[in-house]
């Protein structure tokens, strides 16, 4: 058994034997080098009550090269791509150290949900939302946790049905703002996309004229 496989097997066993961390690791397609990790959302955050799955790939030179991780569960967070699940975290790049383990790295991901870094974002639109209105951001993150991560009042079982999702809430927008521009004759989905791109939220609303929104809506 090579050193990489021994190390990975030990780390998986450590996670299984640790009943306090709530970090779970399982094989994907029986491969010890492709794993799925999961952890509960941290308490007193918009992610509380959710369960978050992470895709983990062990590189050939592990532990001297960082593991590759991305969220499988959709997360609304400045340092996580809302489209791909890619993560902006220093220990997954140049701050990696061979002393880090699967468990400690997963715990760092859990901590990232507690402490967003909007000045070093993976998702610029979400970071703008966070900096414009933290309350609105948290409402949106909480809604994503509800529909994608099985959070309190979960609608995860219904999410496959488009009618079960509130696309305005997913985008973190005020329904009245969306209705206002819908009433001008623009399709709902186009209004949502335009207002999201413009970060039409919180204090920004008074800074963005109706003409500017219409200009965005008229773009092909």
Image: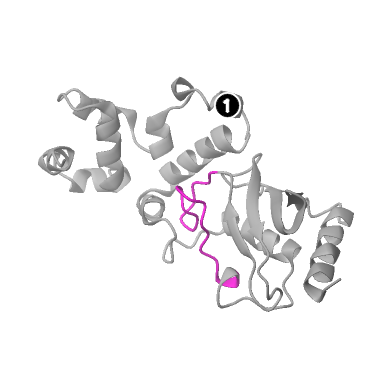
Residue at the image position 63 percent from the left and 71 percent from the top: 66
Which residue corresponds to mark 1? 155
- Magenta: main secondary structure equals loop
Residue furthest right as drawn: 17
Residue 170 placement: quadrant? top left
Residue at (26, 25) in percent of width and height: 179
Q: Looking at the rendering, in which quadrant would you find the N terminus?
A: bottom right
- Residue extent of the magenta highlight: 74-91
Q: Name which residue lies at 53% across and 46% down.
A: 75
Residue 201 screen position, x and y as percent: 31, 43
Q: Looking at the picture, tell me which residue is in the foreground, 208 or 157.
A: 157
Where does the image place residue 60, in percent across and percent down from the top left?
68, 72
Residue sitting nearer the eye, 154 or 136: 154
Q: Confirm whether the magenta stretch covers residue 176.
A: no
Residue 16, compared with residue 209, is above or below; it is below
Q: With 163 as the anchor, is 70 left or right in this view?
A: right
Colour mode?
one colour
Spot occupied by residue 26 in the image (x, y as percentages of width and height): 77, 50
Q: In which quarter of the image is the C terminus?
A: top left
Q: Residue at x 30, y 35 (%)?
A: 192
Q: Is residue 173 or residue 150 the one in the foreground?
A: 150
Q: Quadrant of residue 12?
A: bottom right
Residue 46 in sight in this render: yes
Q: Give how far across and how far down residue 168 sits, in percent.
A: 37, 32
The answer to whether residue 41 shows anywhere in this view is no
**In the drawing, does residue 29 fall left or right of residue 182?**
right
């Amino acid at each position: 058994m090579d050193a990489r496989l021994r190390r990975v097997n030990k780390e998986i066993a450590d996670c299984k034997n640790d009943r306090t961390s709530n970090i779970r690791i399982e094989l994907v397609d029986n491969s010890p080098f492709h794993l799925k990790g999961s952890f509960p959302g941290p308490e007193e955050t918009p992610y509380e009550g959710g369960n978050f799955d992470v895709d983990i790939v062990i590189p050939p030179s592990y532990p001297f090269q960082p593991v590759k991780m991305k969220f499988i569960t959709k997360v609304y967070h400045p340092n996580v791509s809302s489209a791909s699940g890619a993560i902006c975290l220093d220990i997954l790049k140049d701050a990696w150290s061979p002393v880090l383990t699967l468990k400690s790295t997963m715990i760092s991901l859990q901590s990232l949900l507690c402490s967003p870094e909007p000045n070093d974002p993976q998702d610029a639109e979400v970071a703008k939302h966070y900096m414009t209105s933290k309350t609105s951001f948290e409402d949106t993150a909480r809604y994503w946790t509800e529909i994608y991560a099985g959070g309190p009042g979960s609608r995860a079982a219904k999410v496959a049905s488009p009618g079960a999702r509130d696309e305005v809430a997913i985008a973190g927008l005020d329904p009245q703002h969306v209705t206002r521009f819908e009433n001008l004759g623009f399709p709902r989905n186009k209004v949502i996309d335009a207002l999201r791109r413009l970060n039409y939220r919180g204090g920004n609303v008074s800074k963005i004229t109706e003409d500017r929104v219409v200009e965005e809506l008229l773009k092909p």
